[in-house]
Amino acid sequence: MISISRSERAIRNVKVKTKVSGQFRNTDEKGADGCVREDLLMEKKINNMAKKNGTVAGEPLEKQLWKAADKLRKNIDAAEYKHVVLGLIFLKYISDAFEELYARLKTEESAGADPEDKDEYRAENVFFVPREARWSFLQSKATLPQIGKFIDEAMDAIEKENNSLKGVLPKVYARQNLDPTGLGGLINLIGNIALGDAKARSADVLGHVFEYFLGEFALAEGKKGGQFYTPRSIVELLVEMLEMLEPYNGRVFDPCCGSRGHVRTI
């Protein structure tokens, strides 16, 4: 259980941070039934996408997304493709959260709200995403040969606006071994999934997709893959040990807990 890379740690830390701040509460006014209906609609959308990409309908969303994304990988090494895919998933996540708050602030402009004010987003524990880094902008450029350059510039722009992400996000998209067509296909693929809006956060879509992808990349990389991924079975074992020790005020020392995935599991 060795520590994961800075970019992967940043993504998981965002999940822990937002969960602590209460952003993972169910904000659907329709209640639990509304969340179920939303999940079914999302699953239907992924199933339609899966048919186009040769995956099997009825499988978990994250598994279908992985199969489609892996199909676009072609001959790129898994260790390198990992940063490409996970970086885009994180970008989609923060862009979704930003766009949702942006839309709300737009409706409150008459009351003095400013959708372009960074402090509005800091107050809500949401990353500020500049125009050239928003998912809608990138998706509009997905078919262009320079799409890799646009994504790298988007990562740079986000780091400049958010000090906590400085030097963390991957900027590997303009490399010559990345096919622009495949990269554009990956953007359109991920664009079909809501990751960062309130309903997606309540269903922890990012967590399921991210964890599943980490596991698949670990398998694809072989012997060195475990350096950035702790299998769920190990996490569950540690959690069970903690639960057994709780009445006795016992503790388990895990110096390589990495991104605190165990905390999320608890």
Image: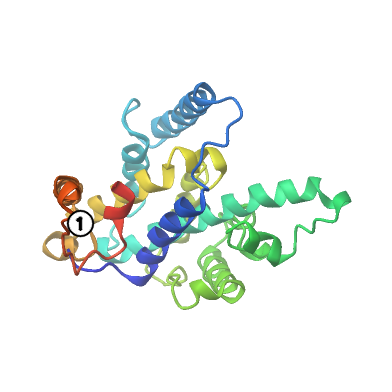
> For the residue labelled by badge 1, is the local secondary structure a helix, a strand or a loop?
loop
In x, y percent, where is residue 44? 46, 26
Taking 114 as reference, is 240 above or below it? Answer: above
Residue at (31% x, 30% y) in the render: 59
153 left or right, relative to 115: left
Quadrant housing residue 43 = top left
Q: Is residue 151 visible?
A: yes
* Depth check, front residue: 59 or 6: 6
35 left or right, relative to 176: right
Point out the image quarter for the N terminus: bottom left
Using a 10 Å C-alpha cutoff, classify the residue at mark 1 as few (fewer than 14 neighbours), some (14 to 19) or many (20 or more): many
Q: Is residue 193 visible?
A: no
Colour scheme: rainbow
The disc labelled 1 sits on which kind of residue?
Thr
Residue identifier under label 1: 230
Residue at (51% x, 48% y) in the render: 22
* Depth check, front residue: 223 or 175: 223
In x, y percent, where is residue 123? 64, 60
Taking 32 as reference, is 117 above or below it? Answer: below
Taking 163 as reference, is 232 above or below it? Answer: above
Residue at (58% x, 55% y) in the render: 95
* Depth check, front residue: 17 or 69: 17
Count of labels shown? 1
Give the farthest residue toward the front.
248
Residue at (54% x, 70% y) in the render: 149
Give the farthest residue toward the right.
110
191 left or right, relative to 182: right
Quadrant housing residue 80 = bottom left
55 left or right, relative to 143: left
In x, y percent, where is residue 172? 42, 71
In x, y percent, where is residue 241? 14, 49
* Depth check, front residue: 177 or 171: 171
